[in-house]
Structure formats: structure tokens, C-alpha cells
Amino acid sequence: MSGTTLIPRGRPPGKLSPARMGLYAFLAICALFFLTPLYVMLVTSLKAMPEIRQGYILAWPSAPSLAAWGKAWFSACTGLSCNGIRVGFVNSLRIMVPSVIVSITVGAITGYALSFWRPRGAVVLFGVLIAVAFIPYQVFIYPLVRIFSHLGLNNSVPGIVLIHTIFGLPTMTLIFRNHFAALPEELFKAARVDGAGFWRIFGAIMLPMALPIIVVAVILQVTGIWNDFIFGLVFAGRANLPMTVQLNNIVNSTQGEREYNVEMAATLLTATVPLVVYFVSGRWFVRGIAAGAVKG
Amino acid sequence: MSRQGNVSLRGVAVAYGPIRVFDRLDLEVAQSEFLVLLGPSGCGKSTLLNAIAGLTEIDDGEIWIGDRNVTWLEPKDRGIAMVFQSYALYPRMDVRANLSFGLKVARTPRAEIERRVRTASEMLQIADLLDRRPAELSGGQRQRVAIGRALVRDAGVFLFDEPLSNLDAQLRSELRVEIKRLHQRLGATMIYVTHDQIEALTLADRIAVMKDRTFQQIGSPQEIYQRPVNRFVATFVGSPAMNFVQGHIAPTTDGPVFRSASLRLPLPTYPFANASIDERPVELGIRPEHVIVAPEAAHAHEVCVEMSEPMGSDLLAWTRLGDLPLSVRLPAETKLTPGDRLRILLPEHRFSLFDLASGARL
């Protein structure tokens, strides 16, 4: 750069060059590609069975109806009982809410302790935690079943909550530890001089500064736990089977005619919670980051 | 809370694993004294301050504050308050909450908290900022709040860890004066860590110069400045820097004489620490303001001006004495052009002679 005046280089914004049009076209095609399955599910769920049998999966329903949604929610058969998928919805909530709260709390405390208090062996513990996170969790299922049955925790909500807490711990600890490690250590020292102890520093100073990372943790845990299938199937017990397992029972039933519209509706209902979390918390997420980005 | 403020370090040692940071340091700080720990980064001054605060555990020795052995006490129980370089204000609390946090933790009655916050905020002129968040404050205001947070603790000992290093020059000198005023007003003991020798000279009752995790010299600013105990202290303190000339010292019948390639300086009145002078290589140091310009003097040396730097209050001339560079401090109104010749005297009682090998003062 040798010029003394600053002239903006490159193409002025606003003009549509062929390259740019190609780019937009590519993006549009990608969007269509990924939205098509959702569209098919949506229109199928609004059709009646005779219309579905004609096979025009992309066609708009001639008489859109929510009948299939009602059936999926209230009276679809999951195995022997025919109470719809709402049973699973309630079960999933009963599993997810405590699991999310407990796993994030435990992860935040562990991350805080590892980053500021550095107890003896903290580095080793953290290393093990991260290493274990890479082992496929299916490996743990059989030993855990034995342990849990020995402890009498099998087939109960507390049991499945404990399972989700254990398996959420590496990720939760990692993201909280990294967040806290980035905070200035002098803040922690100042709080200690002010006389605050382990819990006071955590509750009054560190946690309020962790808001954006809490939102991230909530997104990760809500979607992860809601979408979980195998832990729910193995550890929750018959009475507490989560929505994903119930959905599978509806979709994989082999008796009689397959009610595609009911299956689509049930699937969409099951996917609602993660979708809502993404849309709502995504906005919070940005807000949280913006609030935390100001140098303090 | 204890208002006692004499601090005593007795054989303090700190180690990080197998690495020894300090080995048996001793230091006495008197009640109401302003002690500055001065040294380059990495010399251990902050670690020492953290040890006094109780934020770093010590591996050996004892720390006493007042008549209490505080070696194993928590920071809050030591009767100390601390100000940090990065201000370390709690970002999610407003200024009032920042100031009162420690008092709330200590379950101080609300009226008392309010009284102390009011006193401190008025003293530091931050009373109108009480409802703001740290993010809404300027750097100078943030450091005032940080000092205020130390003030409300009503401690006997204040610890400052490079509190002005993040501020620009203007604010730095402003707050420097403020801290000095606070010290006079509160009469508290203050221990202040800095790498800025100007801060050390202006603030301190006593300076402890540190290098490589040991004390090099502990003394009043005048002692440190006029009679540095070794070459490191001589170079680290003082701006513009001291002039150095390498040469030899030799005893003669007329007393000891300093000789270099182009200089011969008799030293009849130089205050040697040791009476017997043997011949050895030395380095002679003299500060720029101690060089005397004397156009009429008989035994003057002649120097050639190479360049001059006006510094506002005075003028620094970079000259050559033979082939030796020599800086000379002159009155600001002096008119000099490169190539001018000056006649100067080098007053021997202002010299600092250092052994070339060990760097220690002779």
C-alpha cells in the first residue's frame, strides 16, 4: 500500500454480478434440499390416507386436516397401549428437566473448581474426563446396568437423570472450565481478599458471568437429552419411556396399514422441543454474548 | 478489624513444585510506612505481594502483620486490602455493590456499610458513579473504584499490585498523587509493587529493589538513587540513565586513581566502602545531572555535543568525552547545536564505582 488516501478496493456493494447470482442460486438450492424432507413431512401429516396412497409426496394436501396430529397426540398405539405420544412427551419432560438442571449445575461447579481452585490432581482428573468422553458410550451400558441394578436405581427417573448427568459431565465441565479459565484470575483473588469462599465466589461472581455459556450448555443438554433413545430405553423403565422410544414404537409397528400421516405428525411433535429451544435460546445466546463481550 | 500495620517477613520461601521462587527472604515494613517493591517483570515482586496477601501459599518461614502470625490465615483475616493491575472489579455488579461486597460477606451491619461506602466514594470522588457498572467507567474511574473497594475494608495494610500500569501517562501521575495523599491521610501501611522507577521514587518511604527473586537493595529513594549498591540498581533506577565508563582503579601515592583509555580521574574524596584499594577493573558511573558545566574551570574536560533532547524542564545533551558517550543534563534554556564544545567537571563524590566482575559498589 503506497497511496496516501484510502480508496475502498473491490466491487462496490449492491450490484449483482453473475458470480454473485450463482452463489445465491447455490445457497437457494442447498436450502431447498434441506427443507424438502421437512416439507414432505408437514404436507403428509396434513393429508388423509387415500390422498397419501396416490403417491404425490410433494403435492399440497387437497383438504388439509389436523386429524392425524390429533391421533398421534391422543390415541396412536405405542405397543399395547393406545394413548398417543403425549405419554412420552410427559415422560421426556420428567427426565429432561431435572437432567438438564443437575448436569449443568454439576458441570459448572466442576469446571469452576478445576479452573480456579486447582485441587491436587486437577490436571489429571480433567485429562481423564476428556479422554473418557471419546469412548463410545455403548461400551458403558452393560456395566452400568449391572451397577444400577445392584444399587436399585434401574428403571427409575432418578436413575436416568444420574445417567444423563454422568454422560454430560465431560462436555459440561469442559465448556465451563474453558469459560472460567478465560476470566482474569485477579477477579478471583479480589473476591478472596474480600472474604468470599468457594460457594460465594461461584454464586455471586462467577455464575453471573457465565450466562452466555449457561445458554450454550442448555442448548446442548436439552437437545442431547431430548433426542436420547438408548439410555431412555435401557435405564428409564417401562413406565418412564421417553418420547423418542414411544415414537419408535409408533413408527415401527408392523400391524395393519402404515399410517404415514400419523407417523409424520408424531415425528414432528417429537422434534418440536429441540426446534423451539434452538429458535428461542439462539436469540438469548446472542444477547448473552453481547452482554458478556463488554470489557469489565 | 485489626488496624495494626507493621509487616514482617521472616525467612519466607515460595516454591512452585520443584522450582524455588524465593529462598528465605526477610523484610520488615514499619507501621504507616510506604514500601515499594521495584524490579523488572519476573523478579518475583508480585509473588511476594501475593504471599503477603495470602493468595500464594508459602513453603517456609513466617509472615507477621501487627502482633499476629498470619502465615496460615485466609486473606480476609489478615487485615489487608488489595488493589490489582487489571482493577478486578466484579463486572455484573454496580459500583456500590462492588464496594460493599466484602463488607456484605463479612456480615457488616447495613448502616455501617453505607457509611463506609459513602466515606470512601467521597474521598475518591466516585460518589456520582455508584449506580454504574464497571463497563460504563473509564480506566481511571475503574481504578478509583478498585482503590475504594480496598478503602472500605478499613485495613491496616494496603497492597498494590502495579495499580497504575494499565493507565495512560496523564492518569497515572494523577492517581499517583492521589495514592500518596491517601497514604498521608489514612496513615496505613502500604506495600506497592511496580516496575516503574518514577512511581517508586515519588511514592516510597523506602524502596526494595528486586532482581532474580532476591532483594538487591532496600533503602530510601535518596539512598537508592545516590548510592546504588550495584550496577543493576544503578541502571534500573534513574531516567535518563546513568553514564558508565569502563576502566581500572589503582592506588597511587596521591590516593586512588581511576584510569581509562582517555581519562585519568584522581579519587581522593570518593567514599570507598572498603579502606584498602587494590588495583582492579571497575566501571565508573555518573548521573547526567551530576556533570557540572564549567567554562572557566582550570582542570575541566572538553566534550563535543552530538545531539540535544529538550525535555521541557531541562535539556539532555548527548556528548562525547574523547570516544566515550556521556549524557549531560543542562538548564532548559541552554542553546546548543551539534558540534559545540562544552567544558565540564566530573565531581568525584557523585561517582558510583562498581567492580567490573561482580557489579558491586566499591
Image: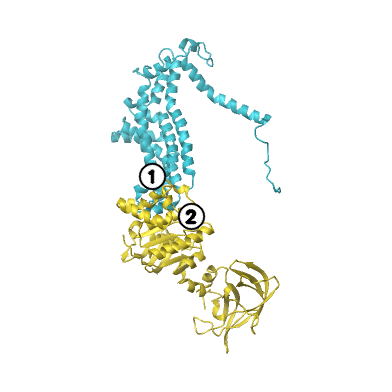
Quadrant location, the N terminus of chain B: bottom left
Quarter holding residue B75: bottom left
As measured in the structure, the alpha-carbon distance from the residue carrying label 2 to the one carrying label 1 is 36 Å
Residue B216 horizontal side relative to residue B102, left or right? right
User: At which x and y percent is residue B26?
Assistant: 40, 69
Report the residue at 52% width, 22% height from top: A37
User: At which x and y percent is residue B48?
Assistant: 42, 62
* Chain on which label 1 sits: A
The residue lying toward the viewer, choosing from A95 and B272, is: B272
Q: Of circles 2 and 1, which is in front?
A: 2
Residue A296 can be seen, yes or no: no
Give, as a three-letter code, the residue at label 1. Answer: Thr
Query: In the rendered image of this protein, which colour is used for chain B?
Result: yellow
Secondary-structure class at tag 2: helix
Residue A59 horizontal side relative to residue A100, left or right? right
Give, as a three-letter code, the residue at label 2. Answer: Gly
Query: In the rendered image of this protein, which colour is used for chain A?
Result: cyan
Q: Which residue is mark 1?
A: A110
Residue placed furthest toward the top = A50
